[in-house]
Image (spheres, rainbow, N blue to C red):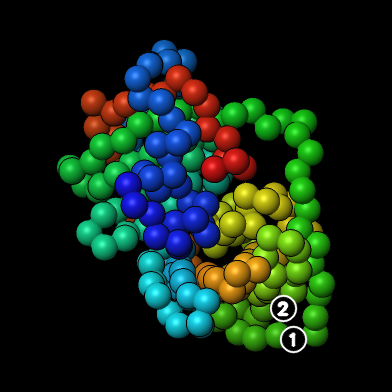
Amino acid sequence: MKRLFYTLITIVVTASALTAQISLGKISPNIKYEGNYSFSASIDMEIDFYNRNGSLQNTLPYNSYYTPDYQHICIKHRNRSTVYQTIFDIPNNSCLIVLGEGKDMSGSAANMKDNSGRELRELPLVKTDQTKNIAGYNCTLYTFDVPEFKGEFWASNEIKLPNDVGIFKASKMAKYYQNVPVQGFILEITSTTPRGRKTVMKTLKLHNSSDYSVNIPENFGMAINKVDYYEL
């Protein structure tokens, strides 16, 4: 599958990224997942992709759905006519890759790699005095500059949510730097690669009440190898 540059910038799992991680030729009986996932809250997001000249190349709408205990999380986005959904089932330690929506769905499930005891890298941030309002919340600016990219975070202490359900879940920083030493919920991230590719990830709105569910089809596939979220 041909992948445009923006599929390499975000780590929210798409079908093209997962084909390198999941072998559908063998079946593991140890993979467990639910037949239905229902979510009660959601976050509307948007990701802008710019080329080296600073021109906007593409904008993708993203949605994050989650349960009150944050044990089930669904990251959904649409690229042209294709809908991609990644469901993280924490109790079953599984990750489901769903292509499509409604009754027209296919995909596979895999166990998540056990990262307990693993030393996670921390993104070095510099707190500034700059503030601005994003989606109705007061935010503080943090900057970062590492070999892979440089940019900024806008985070708010007014939101009591884990960053695992927000825009950071869709960010490349979660791949290279899994610990974020910042208090508060990240609502916006801007990052630029050494080659000049810029990505702006924005939170548009938080919904404390939402009604969204995904029914997993009976012919859903399973994979024998495990998915490592931090290596996707």
Q: Are marks 1 and 2 in contact (CB under 8 Å)?
A: yes
Q: Secondary structure at mark 2?
A: strand
Q: Is 133 placed above or below 64 here?
A: below
Residue type at mark 2?
Leu
Looking at the image, which is closer to me, 139 or 109? 109
Q: Residue at x 44, y 57 (%)?
A: 7
Q: Residue at x 80, y 85 (%)?
A: 129
Q: Is 158 placed above or below 116 here?
A: below
Q: Quadrant of residue 36?
A: top left
Residue 91 can be seen in this image: no
Q: Is 32 placed above or below 18 here?
A: above
Residue type at mark 1?
Gln
Q: Residue at x 40, y 75 (%)?
A: 57
Percent position (x, y) of residue 148?
A: 68, 60
Q: Which residue is mark 2?
A: 141
Percent position (x, y) of residue 152?
A: 68, 74
Q: Is 202 placed above or below 227 here?
A: below
Task: Give the residue at the far left of this rendering.
Answer: 103
Q: Which residue is mark 1?
A: 130
Q: Residues within 10 Å of mark 2 (few under 14, many from 20)?
A: many
Real-space Cα separation, disc 1 to disc 2, in angstroms: 6 Å
Horizontally, residue 22 falls left or right of residue 36, namely: right
How many labels sit on residues?
2
Percent position (x, y) of residue 35?
A: 32, 30
Percent position (x, y) of residue 188?
A: 58, 72
